[in-house]
Image (cartoon, rainbow, N blue to C red):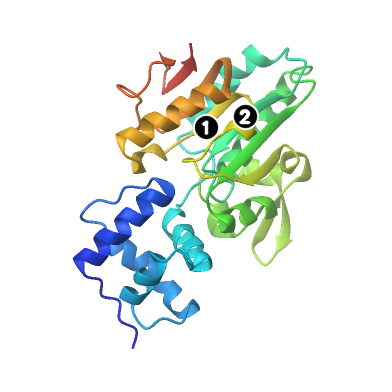
Amino acid sequence: MANKNLEQHEYNQFRTFLEQQCGIVLGDNKLYLVKSRLAPLMGRFEVESLSELVSKTLSPRERQLRAAVVDAMTTNETLWFRDQYPFELLKSKIFPEFKNLRRPVKIWSAASSSGQEPYSIAMTTAEYQAKNLGSFTSGAQIVGTDISNTMLDLCKNAEYDSLALARGLSPERRKKFFTDSGHGMAKVVEPVRKMATFRHLNLLDSYALMGKFDIIFCRNVLIYFSPEIKSKIIGQFAQALNPKGYLFLGASESMTGLNDDFEMIRCNPGIIYQKK
């Protein structure tokens, strides 16, 4: 029978590994999370114990295992139109400022998980264009990035089961923006899919090759990082934004004391940050 025990010193070694690889900081009380996320990998990589799995993960030679472990630890649940207000703010405040652009409006969904956020942005864009004819004549380019190749494959496939579709998606939007593909699955319609592209990116790496953006979404991600790494990431976001560009963080996240490149704008509801 597989041994799922992990000693404290092994857990500490794994915490260090994870922070170095992707910036995620695990607290002292997250051993249960490591066990639940890594246990399914034991059979796949033919190891007898969680201790052996962690030990192998620490070896630079085990590239496939290390990628699978990071994949397992960074996969988070998401839902459509999370918190609602960011998407309403796009329509009411931000999109009107960009409606006369003679180039595509560029939006980045950082840590896009399984695609709900970038496709929610694309649906919001389509709804705005339908009500404001002549806006965004060059369209919108939405880029979703994630550290998990498994999640990126789901994004690119743009097909979701009934459980995922039930989380935050209204019946009206499901009818308008999805086509049934059988067996309880539905696929995002082509015009919405075409707005979004996806690529692998570790937020600890350089963003120089990403180009410049008008709007960046990085929501409910920074909570996993240390203050030093948060500050570094926010600074890189500032460099990746065009002048007066906007940054969305999660509802419980703040950049207070981390960066001076942004002005905080209080909305009703919600907060957004605009590059100075």
Packing grade of label 1 (10 A; few <14, some 14-19, many >=20) is many
Give x and y (percent) for residue 132.
72, 18
In this rendering, would 86 be left or right of 266?
right
Q: Which residue is mark 1?
A: 217
Give the total number of marks visible in the rendering: 2
Frontmost residue, 14 versus 196: 14
Packing grade of label 2 (10 A; few <14, some 14-19, many >=20) is many
Between the residue at mark 2 and the residue at mark 1, the CA separation in whole angstroms equals 8 Å
Q: Residue at x 21, y 64 (%)?
A: 9
Q: Is residue 169 visible?
A: no
From what the image shows, is residue 167 above or below residue 216?
below
Give x and y (percent) for residue 246.
53, 20
Element at label 1:
strand
Quarter assignment of residue 100:
top right
Q: Residue at x 34, y 84 (%)?
A: 2
- The quarter in which the N terminus is drawn is bottom left
In this rendering, would 237 be left or right of 128?
left
Quarter assignment of residue 157:
bottom right
Amino acid type assigned to the residue bearing label 1 in the image: Phe
Frontmost residue, 200 versus 190: 200
Frontmost residue, 236 versus 114: 236
Q: Residue at x 64, y 45 (%)?
A: 199
Q: Which residue is mark 2?
A: 107
Give x and y (percent) for residue 54.
35, 69
Quarter assignment of residue 253:
top left
Label 2 vs 1, first from the N-terminus: 2
Amino acid type assigned to the residue bearing label 2 in the image: Ile
From what the image shows, is residue 216 above or below residue 246?
below
Give x and y (percent) for residue 194.
76, 40
Contact? badges 2 and 1 (CB < 8 Å): yes
Element at label 2:
strand
In this rendering, would 163 be left or right of 137?
left
